[in-house]
Amino acid sequence: MFILLLLIYILAATAFVRIEFVARVISENFRVKINSCTIFSLILLCSFAIQVAIGITGSSFSISNRDTPFVNAKSFIKTDEIPIFGNVKPIRSDEHTVLTPSAIAQYNSKPQFPVINHNLGEEGQNMLITHMTSVPVWHISAIARPATWGFFFLDLRSALSWYWLFPIYGCLFAFWGVVATISKLDWRTSFLFSLWFCVSPYVAAWSNWPAYVALFPSLMFLCFVYIFKQESRIKNYLAGIVLGVAIAGFVLVLYPPWQITLGYLFVILSIAYFIREKLYQNFNAVVLQSLALSLLIAGAILYCWFIDARSAIELMSNTIYPGQRQTLSGGTVTLPWLLKGFTNFILYSMPDFGVKSGSGISQNPSEIASFYYLFIPIIFLFVKKVINKQIDILSWGLVIFAIFTIIFMCVGLPQEFARISLWGRLPAERADFALGVAYILLCALLLKNPSNCLNEGFNIIALLISIIWIFIVIWAIQCLPVQINKVISTENLVITAILTTVCGYYLASGQTKIFIYCMLGLSLASTFAFNPIAIATNEVSIKEPIKNIIDKDFNPSDTILVLEDESAAAFFAAGKHVINGIFYYPQFDFWKKLDPKGYNKQIYNRYYHLWCIGSNYQYTQEYDFYSPQADYVVINLNLSKFDFKIIGAKFIVAPPKYAVYLEKNTSIHKIFNDSGITWYQLN
């Protein structure tokens, strides 16, 4: 299977290099006029289709399967999920513990794809308010959530593959179009810039979600430009429909820290392009009708979504976290932390990096991910272009946005301005995403006219500029937390210095193709070992004989309580009704049983992972609860005394260490023990 996958990539790479020959052969033998860019695009689409058919995924969902021996996860050859390359990433817990299990739960729900999934908690959860790629819901808003489309017409294996791959391929095409449109580079170079972004450490570390978020504004920009440049009424209307869906899709990402910054960036980009290309001269009734149609489509989708998600939205907006998060003003990012991306090449090649729990933000592969910023080399190139009068309004717009973003991150904004502008809704480090997008687009714009006549003096200056920058980078790396520095050897620093100097030199000297190949190679080298490849599971269900035991008298309203484990997510994925799991908003009917007067509402009024443990058995109390961090709530139970009838759990799943205490509990009785897990049933 690995050989087949490798052949797919080799075919695409070969086509990229020799595509003109293929185009000529087709034109001569089939009398079909087709350009090389179109052929290459079709090859990419075929690559996507083949991988989806095979079931290729980079998901770490198998972690949940590995930790839950009573859940059956089969691939198409009737074995567990098949690893092909690399190792799963525990740090991607939002992916393998939250979104992927929730998507599978929607698939396994009866009926499938409900708006409210009654298998989670007593009240069920509205699935329309899940963020990022979201989950499949049989609702009109699914039109604007393309990552979930595969679940509606494919088997589970291929659907999970679509779920993982669509953000990459979708962004690859859309961002490719943006780069080509604003820079007017040839299609090959534009594609390489898009590929550079899609394989960057920031995108990979966050489960490809940044690519998915960038897909929508990229598509919005392309449709907006197309409407003003196209004279066909039908094509304009079609572009208006796609624009409307893209607007709705961007809103439904439901992650303000990335939406706000990227929204500002693409508004600036659109206005600057509108002025540069004098698109206002093309304004007419058809353009107005197309734009109005897009707003109508977006409004209809979002209105239907809001009506059916209103109660959940109200609950979320009134939560302590994240609904009532205080206004932030930035200024928390230091220069070394801004340049932390230069450690990615070293750290991502270490299998154990970030594996140990409790190692802090500096050992978190997602938080340490960033872009390879070459600030001094790009400033040098920018100044050179200004002197030569080769700078347009688009470049100025991107530079102003980048400066503003860096000021927000490293210096901070007035709190009132941050609140009004909405930048106060995001932690300073999350602005790194939009800064990286702006940086890549600016590189494309400044390199659209490559330097063909470099003299010796200019070469020396470009080299000196790059050397100055690498000294700053090395200083920044050494200023990072000791947990990072202690694993970076002198040899690794030297390699980083050489690679950065080379990339900086080619950028400062304006040598487009060599620069983009160097940056693409550096990004691929950084993320190659980080991304696992596997064949997705084709079935998630409860194994025998557990299934027979609990299905014997299991009603849809009966619930399972999982003690000291996130196995609840696996049960939920298997289509079973669980009490604990991951909740986007609190279920107050449940909490009224434990906190009748609501004295401790501030603890559970949040987005949270609900854990139930038994850590202190000397209580006179039967239980208490607390929030150890913003997105966790822990219920601490006296396992010998707690009356499980209070929360109505029919089945309790517990690790062996709790057996001696649970066997003293008169509200339950033991029914089964398997794979180190003990099952109890309510009396």
Image: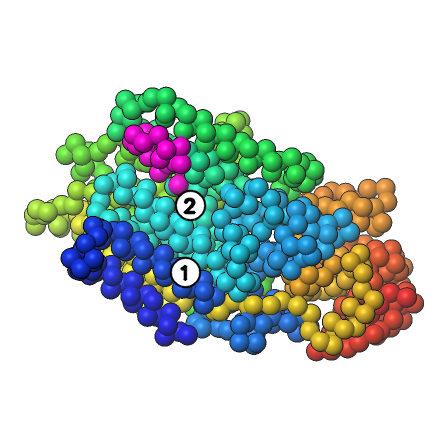
Mark 2, Cα crowd under 10 Å, few <14 / some 14-19 / many 20+, is many
- On-image quarter of the N terminus: bottom left
- On-image quarter of the C terminus: bottom right
Give residue 215's mark. 2
Residue, far right: 666
Q: Nearer the viewer, residue 668 or 557?
A: 557
Numbered disc 1: secondary structure? helix
**Part of the protein shown in magenta:** 219-239
Give residue 49's mark. 1
The image quarter in which residue 291 lies: top left
Q: Nearer the viewer, residue 215 or 625?
A: 215
| Residue 449, horizontal then vertical, whole percent | 17, 42
**CA–CA distance in space, label 2 to label 1:** 19 Å
| Residue 275, horizontal then vertical, whole percent | 29, 26
Of the residues tagged 2 and 1, which is closer to the observer?
A: 1
Q: Residue at x 55, y 45 (%)?
A: 142
Give residue 533's mark. none
Q: Is residue 187 left or right of residue 488?
A: left
Numbered disc 2: secondary structure? helix
